[in-house]
């Protein structure tokens, strides 16, 4: 989730204006984000393709810094993210198994 204001700590995706696979250019609106004070446009800063939406417009608060989408620069790379999901926080927090001494 991008920080769209100096005081923003979290936001809600109000709507996605692009669909997965869509091409966009710098300045194009990608989504509307509801902050604690207003609904703000989240605009692209560069050209690319929206490969995967990770945070649907479902009313859930998302902390600033949390990934909300995967963007690629080449249309041929979009398909590589069709089934992509973020690792769950449970698996990230679990320690890796260690080998038992023999």
Image: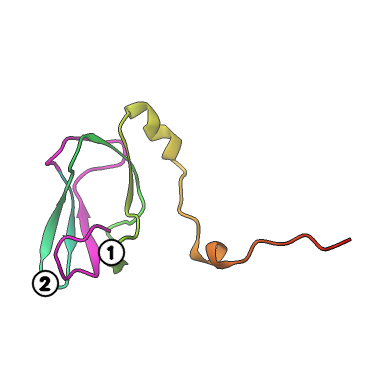
Relative horizontal placement of residue 85, taking residue 101 as reference (left or right): left
**Residue that extends furthest to the front in the rendered view of this protein:** 101
Which stretch is magenta? 1-28
Earlier in the chain: of badge 1 and badge 2, it is 2
Quarter of the rendering occupied by the N terminus: bottom left
Task: Provide residue 90's location: percent of width, then percent of height.
Answer: 54, 66
Q: Residues within 10 Å of mark 2 (few under 14, many from 20)?
A: few
Q: Which residue is mark 1?
A: 64
Q: Is residue 87 left or right of residue 74?
A: right
Q: Nearer the viewer, residue 28 or 56?
A: 28
Which residue does the image show at 37% across and 34% down from the upper left? 78
* 56 is higher (above) or lower (below) than 35: above
- Quarter of image, res 72: top left
- Please, what secondary structure does the residue beneath circle 2 have? loop
Between 51 and 8, which is closer to the camera in this rendering? 8
Q: Main secondary structure of the magenta part?
A: loop
Q: How is the image coloured?
A: rainbow
> Which residue extends farthest right?
102
In which quadrant is the C terminus drawn? bottom right
- Graded by Cα atoms within 10 Å as few (under 14), some (14 to 19) or many (20 or more), the crowding at tag 1 reads some
Taking the spot 17% from the left edge, 43% from the top edge, the residue there is 45
Numbered circle sitting on residue 37: 2
Element under disc 1: loop
14 part of magenta stretch: yes
- Within the image, what quadrant is residue 71 found in? top left
Please state which of the two labelled residues, at mark 1 or mark 2, is closer to the viewer: 1
The reply to whether the magenta stretch includes residue 43 is no
Distance between the alpha carbons at the discs numbered 1 and 2:
15 Å
Left or right: where 11 falls relative to 87: left
Q: Position of residue 97 (x, y in %)?
A: 70, 62
């Amino acid at each position: 989730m991008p920080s769209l204001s100096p005081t923003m700590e979290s936001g809600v995706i109000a709507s996605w204006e692009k669909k997965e696979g869509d091409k966009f250019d710098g300045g194009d609106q990608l989504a509307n984000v509801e902050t604690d004070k207003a609904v703000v446009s989240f605009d692209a800063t560069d050209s690319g393709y929206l490969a995967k939406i990770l945070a649907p417009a479902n009313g859930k608060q998302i902390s600033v810094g949390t990934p909300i989408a995967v963007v690629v620069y080449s249309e041929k790379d979009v398909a590589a993210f069709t089934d992509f999901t973020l690792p769950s926080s449970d698996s990230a927090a679990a320690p890796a198994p260690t080998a038992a001494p023999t």
